[in-house]
């Protein structure tokens, strides 16, 4: 069966889609679970069965019994759900164009070339533990599985880094230099022992001496959304609101993380502010959908939450999951048609699962 095409859904209003989403969900019952990342727009988030950061969502995907997992997030998250769920379960990403621009900054060809270059300098398999941020394609998780490496998320990076250093004396960390730097700094590693590895230059743009001295090689990758937050935003907030607290995601740059009162994953940010005993004033450095929703939810308790940047910074790929796409995949499911399935090829899934399971075991 080919199912309904998407085009007619484009003409539907958001409101019309809401009613159709609810009706389809009712028909599907326990057959479907909707997992939703905190950056999703509110008109999607309101339909979630379960919400979380990347670590929590990967655990939830491994635990759910539903035959169909509709993943409202980005591509790498849906891949993780496919790898960790049972073979008979199907993972659906409502819009296949919902990628992650940071994840795209590393690819297998570049990582393998970098690994070969390092192998020309040292016994690489005994010297470097490859660590990939979960924001990466499944084939990079498979690379880590094959080479004794591991996956980390924004909420377990410190634990994972300790594990990585217990295996081998150095770490190759990709693709987010900022998470890698912040994590290494918190372990007492100096900034000059964590040079940036530019995969487009021979030997990452480094000298042999710099590689020999390095404890962590930080892949030249970043999240454009989180680079919109600057230390001057924190300084201005503190001048205006000296009692206020600042909380940032570790994808922010080093100066922002160092100036914040707390740094953590999206789940940590949501939990910290919701569970704070006193009404207070917060400045938050992460994606706008999360911050605006959180601000609305905690306002009745007298908590004030403001966005760190003076610019609008949303994750445009997370935004691609809209009511039109959600209505489309759910109504197709009612007809027993799976559109936009995410299926990681078997050999890749097997090796990627090794590095993901290592992570889940120790975090
Ligand atoms: P979390 O795991 O903290 O939700 O982060 C995912 C992400 O993509 C942040 O930009
Ligand atoms: Fe990727 Fe940045 Fe969007 Fe997170 S906010 S999904 S890191 S592009």
Image (cartoon, grey):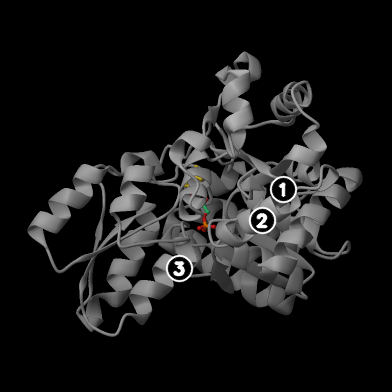
Establish whether ligand 2 lies closer than 8 Å to the Cβ of label 1: no
Left or right of 166, for residue 229: left
Q: Do labels 2 and 1 touch, CB within 8 Å? A: yes
Establish whether ligand 1 lies closer than 8 Å to the Cβ of label 3: yes
Earlier residue among tags 3 and 2: 3
Q: Which residue is mark 2?
A: 329
Residue 135: x and y in percent read: 60, 46
For the point 52% across and 36% down, the residue is 193
Q: Which residue is mark 3?
A: 268
Can residue 191 be seen from the camera position used here?
yes
Earlier residue among tags 1 and 3: 3
Q: Nearer the viewer, mark 3 or mark 2?
A: 3
CA gap between label 2 and label 1 equals 8 Å
- In what element is the residue under mark 2? helix
Q: Do labels 3 and 2 touch, CB within 8 Å? A: no
- Residue 199, located in which quarter of the rendered image? top right
Left or right of 221, for residue 144: right
Q: Which residue, as the protein is rendered here, is positioned at the far top?
A: 202
Q: Which residue, as the protein is rendered here, is positioned at the far bottom?
A: 277
CA gap between label 3 and label 2 equals 30 Å
Residue 9: x and y in percent read: 56, 49
User: Quarter of the image containing the C terminus?
Assistant: bottom right
Q: Which residue is mark 1?
A: 340
Q: Which residue, as the protein is rendered here, is positioned at the far left?
A: 240
Left or right of 301, for residue 151: right
* Residue in the foreground of this view, choosing between 61 and 246: 246
Q: Which mark is residue 179?
A: none
For the point 80% across and 40% down, the residue is 126
């Amino acid at each position: 069966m080919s199912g309904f095409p998407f085009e007619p859904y484009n003409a539907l209003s958001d409101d019309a889609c809401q009613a159709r989403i609810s009706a389809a969900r009712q028909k599907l019952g326990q057959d479907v679970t909707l997992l939703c990342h905190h950056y999703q727009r509110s008109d999607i988030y309101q339909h979630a069965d379960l919400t979380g950061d990347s670590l929590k969502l990967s655990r939830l995907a491994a635990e759910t019994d539903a035959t169909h997992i509709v993943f409202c997030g980005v591509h790498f998250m849906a891949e993780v759900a496919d790898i960790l769920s049972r073979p008979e379960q199907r993972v659906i990403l409502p819009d296949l164009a919902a990628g992650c621009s940071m994840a795209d900054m590393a690819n297998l060809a570049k990582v393998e070339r970098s690994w070969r270059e390092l192998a020309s300098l040292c016994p690489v398999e005994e010297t470097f533990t490859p660590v990939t941020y979960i924001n990466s394609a499944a084939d990079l998780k498979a690379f880590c599985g094959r080479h004794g490496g591991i996956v980390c998320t924004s909420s377990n990076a410190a634990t994972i880094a300790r594990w990585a250093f217990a295996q081998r004396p150095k770490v190759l960390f990709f693709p987010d230099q900022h998470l890698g730097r912040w994590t290494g700094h918190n372990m007492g590693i100096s900034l000059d022992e964590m040079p940036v590895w530019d995969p487009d230059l021979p030997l990452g743009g480094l000298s042999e001496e710099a590689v020999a001295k390095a404890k962590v090689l930080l892949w030249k990758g970043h999240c454009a959304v989180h680079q919109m937050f600057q230390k001057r935003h924190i300084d201005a907030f503190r001048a205006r609101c000296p009692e206020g607290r600042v909380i940032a995601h570790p994808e922010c740059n080093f100066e922002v993380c160092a100036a914040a009162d707390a740094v953590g994953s999206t789940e940590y940010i949501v939990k910290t502010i919701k569970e704070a005993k006193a009404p207070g004033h917060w400045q938050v450095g992460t994606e706008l959908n999360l911050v605006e929703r959180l601000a609305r939810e905690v306002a009745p308790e007298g908590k004030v939450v403001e966005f760190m940047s003076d610019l609008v910074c949303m994750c445009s790929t997370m935004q691609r999951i809209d009511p039109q796409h959600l209505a489309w995949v759910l109504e197709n499911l009612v007809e027993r048609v799976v559109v936009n399935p995410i299926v990681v090829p078997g050999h890749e899934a097997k090796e990627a699962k090794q590095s993901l399971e290592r992570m889940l075991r120790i975090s």
